[in-house]
Amino acid sequence: MRKRIYWMDWLRVLATAMIVLYHFGVESRLATDLASNAFLPTMVFGFDIGQVAVSLFFMLSGAALMYVYGESDKPLGLRAFFVKRVLDILPYFWVAYALDVLAITMLGGSAFPDGIPAWRFALTVVGMDGYTAGLGEPFAPNFYLLGEWFIGCLIFLYALAPAMMKGVRRAPALTAAIVVAVAIAGAVFVPRTGLAMDAGRYFTTRAVDMLVGMLFIHMVKTPQPALALTGCGLVAIDCLAGHPVPFYFDMTIGATALLLAGGYLFSLVRSERANTAVTKIASVSYPVFLTHHRVIVRTLWTYGGVLMGLRVEAKLLAVAALAAVATGMLVKVIGDALKRTLRAATTRSM
């Protein structure tokens, strides 16, 4: 078994916290009359913290894949690889979705609007409803409830991952050039087709994030102080220049800085107790990502009042965060059980 990389767990927890803070900040402005008094920023140094956090998640996914599979001389085994990826994503999504439907029903609402063709529920089953929710006919409207666009994008990236890992290992510079070129081409030409999705959500664009994580593990291995300074320099230059690159690459710059600087700072943590605790928290990051947005919305709209200063908003944030973690833990427990059942079934069939 490979040694656990604790600094990656710290970064995963940081990214989750950033996402929760971002969506709380956004939703608190929508749910209250004193929107301008919301104290949580959604932008820091000109970076959208939610977008940067998502990019960081993709980088960590690429780094983890490269660490586990990319540096090995053994054949990858594509079937086993893809089965594991599916079981790492979909069971938890299904559980979170079912719990949300249950919550909506218990509150007297209807989870499934009338008039949507039943076949579109297949998009939910495969985790693509959020990714296709804004595309219009024939994919939308569909039965999207939670999970954001992240899940569908991640599925596409996992499909590309074996080829990317092979490329990084054999020809990193050429692979990087190809991935970046495809990302730029997609961002420039796809919008001209009328696709109703911003370029920051294209899996071709976000493949750059996964590539950064893979390259880090392949070429650097562990965080370095010089690279931490480089990450800080990237942010400083980008800010001083007024963020000259398009937003879909600007979020990659911000996430790369966090990977380099944050990864180094967290690598300095020597407390086994702290590292073990963070690893346990990180194991719930994906379920929390699935559920937090709906939990935040329900918390704010249940309160239903004007935010009267920082104290009230801080209390609401604490309630929403604790509820998101509790819901995430429930999703993880049930999802783990479902995953074990499915894994046993797939193992027998392989």
Image (tube, grey):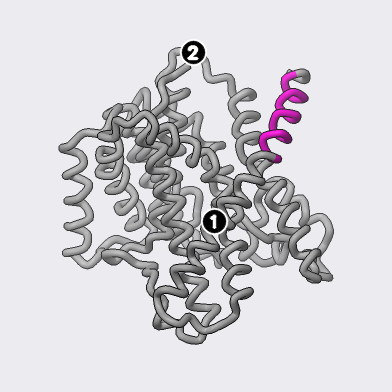
x 65%, y 29%: residue:
83
Residue ID for mark 1: 322
The CA span between labels 1 and 2 is 42 Å
Query: What amino acid is at disc 1?
Result: Leu
- Outermost residue, top side: 74
- The relative height of residue 99 versus residue 223 in the rendered view (above or below) is below
Mark 1 is surrounded, within 10 Å at the Cα level, by few (under 14), some (14 to 19) or many (20 or more) other residues, namely some
Of tags 1 and 2, which is closer to the observer? 1
Residue closer to the observer: 337 or 42: 337
x 41%, y 56%: residue:
18
Query: What amino acid is at disc 2?
Result: Lys
x 74%, y 30%: residue:
342
Mark 2 is surrounded, within 10 Å at the Cα level, by few (under 14), some (14 to 19) or many (20 or more) other residues, namely few
Residue span colored magenta: 334-347
Left or right of 125, for residue 274? left
- Whether residue 122 is visible, yes or no, is yes
Q: Quadrant of residue 340?
A: top right
User: Residue 106 lies in magenta, yes or no?
Assistant: no
Q: What's the magenta bit mostly, secondary-structure-wise? A: helix
- Marks 1 and 2 close (CB-CB < 8 Å): no
Left or right of 209, for residue 269? left
Q: Quadrant of residue 238?
A: bottom left
- The relative height of residue 139 versus residue 286 in the rendered view (above or below) is below
Residue 305 pos. (x, y %): 56, 82
Q: Earlier in the sequence, mark 1 or mark 2?
A: 2
User: Residue 340 lies in magenta, yes or no?
Assistant: yes
Regarding mark 1 in the picture, which secondary structure is present there? Answer: helix
